[in-house]
Amino acid sequence: MNILDRAIAVFSPERALKRAVARKQLDILNSGYGHHGASRTKKSLVGWISKGGSPKEDIDKNLPILRERSRDLYMGAPLATGALKTMRTNVVGAGLQLKAQIDADFLGMSDEEAEAWEELVEREFSLWASSVSCDAQRMNNFYELQQLAFLSQLMSGDCFALLPVIPRPGMPYDLRIQLIEADRVCDPQPKPPDKDISGGVEIGKNGEVVAYYIAQKHPLSADIGQNEWVRVEAFGRVTGRPNILHLMEAERPEQRRGVPILAPVIESLKQLSRYTEAELMAAVVSGMYTVFIETKSPTTEIPLGESVPEEYQVDIEDENTYELGNGAIIALGEGETIKEANPGRPNSAFDGFVVAVCRQIGAALEIPYELLVKQFTASYSASRAALLEAWKMFRMRRSWLASDFCQPIYEEWLAEAVAKGRVPAPGFFSDPIIRKAYSEAEWNGPSQGQIDPLKEVKAAAQRVSEGFSTRAKETVELTGGDFYKNHRQRVREEKLRREGGLVKDEQNSKTDV
């Protein structure tokens, strides 16, 4: 209260009070977003209590329970399991395949030389990638590791991959891939006082990622013993090459750890799972035709429940638990009648409610409802639109997996192949731009598939004829194949058909005429 208000309060307290109220109203007067989402006076928003925080408070501190609940849903909620597997199958499928794309013009190579070099690299890479020796645990090949890494990232928020060098007999390449589950990258105990560490990630002065701390034992493991942490620098001090790959999807600046994809819909999925289980149990109870015994007059005889034969007792430890068998008949005492317990199942509103919730879950996960539940009952146009919308997300995630996982590993393998002389690449280690020219590649995954193959093929042929696309691209999009390999195979097939007399040679036919 200023001097003027104090003076007015001495002579006219009522007027001073009105001035104070008016000033308070001015302080909370809304403007801009204050009229809408930031309003503090609207009744619909007054009860909305929210508290913001940095990525460290909002994400890092909540990650342990988010991971546990996300994995629990994957193990026990069919809709959550289906959503994650749908993404994995469409994004990765049997594994993203290497298609070397050397920059021949920059390297001064002819098309024939470039094609020969690419075939050599793909053959050598297949030797390593198709073997379980590429896995540090010796359990999965490179393509199966892609599936595992991607599914783990979806489920836990992020996944890590170390690239150790482990020589093994029978394999000319020593590069290995070691996948690390998200929980193992965590803050060391005790935490170094001179380091800025959050979620197991050490941050430098400029906000860059310096190192990761990996627990030797899983934090949720039941193994007894003191845990130890290993500090792994993010990049080599001399070469600058990555020592560890971090697969995560960032949603906020300065975010260091990933969030499980199911995080926004954890509550919806859990409640829907509970509701489904309750409806299923109600339907089972209704199918068993449950009845209760109603006694109209007092009796000193043994109650029916105590006279039920032992074969109808489900739980031996609980003598009050019984089950009515199919077609079983039990005699009643005098004055006892049956009262049915009818739960009214199946519930006619169940399907409509589940569909409504699934549509919201699908929207959050970028999976159309039809694809989420694998039920296509709409028209061709609507079903195709749903698939096209889903494939926008699938392609985005495939590009992300290729650039953050497949490509860095391929570049490390190629460096070893060149160093060992199995792949010729002059100037590879002398100039970064030359190394990049040799390392260019595409990663092709499963095709989108077609609802009406004939229409899709005609559309692809039209795009090629008009110059909007190429045969190589359309081959990948339609079948996931390789146009050049298909072309060579077709040449051999047509030659055999002509030699076998199944097809007449066009040149000979013209001569005969």
Image (cartoon, rainbow, N blue to C red):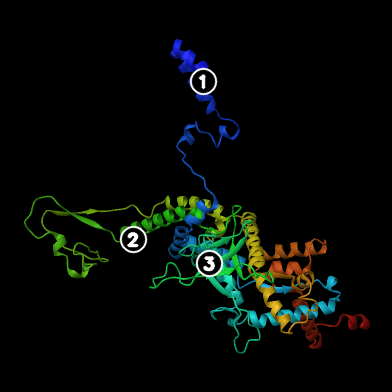
Above or below residue 226? Residue 290 is above
Total numbered labels: 3
Q: Earlier in the sequence, mark 2 or mark 1?
A: 1
- Whether residue 157 sits left or right of residue 69 in the image: it is right
Where is mark 2, residue-wise?
Answer: 284
Q: Quadrant of residue 395?
A: bottom right
Identified by mark 3, the residue type is Tyr
Identified by mark 2, the residue type is Val
Label 2: few (<14), some (14–19) or many (≥20) C-alpha neighbours in 10 Å: some
Q: Residue at x 63, y 62 (%)?
A: 397
The circle on residue 258 is: none
Quadrant position of the C terminus in the picture: bottom right
Q: Position of residue 26 (x, y in %)?
A: 54, 25
In depth, the one of 258 and 389 nearer the eye is 258
Where is mark 1, residue-wise?
Answer: 2
Q: Earlier in the sequence, mark 2 or mark 3?
A: 3
Q: Position of residue 345 (x, y in %)?
A: 36, 54
Circle 3 SS class: strand
Identified by mark 1, the residue type is Asn
Q: Nearer the viewer, mark 3 or mark 1?
A: 1
Label 3: few (<14), some (14–19) or many (≥20) C-alpha neighbours in 10 Å: many
Q: Residue at x 53, y 34 (%)?
A: 39
Q: Residue furthest top?
A: 11
Where is mark 3, residue-wise?
Answer: 213
**How far apart are labels 2 and 1 at the CA level?**
74 Å
Above or below residue 392? Residue 38 is above
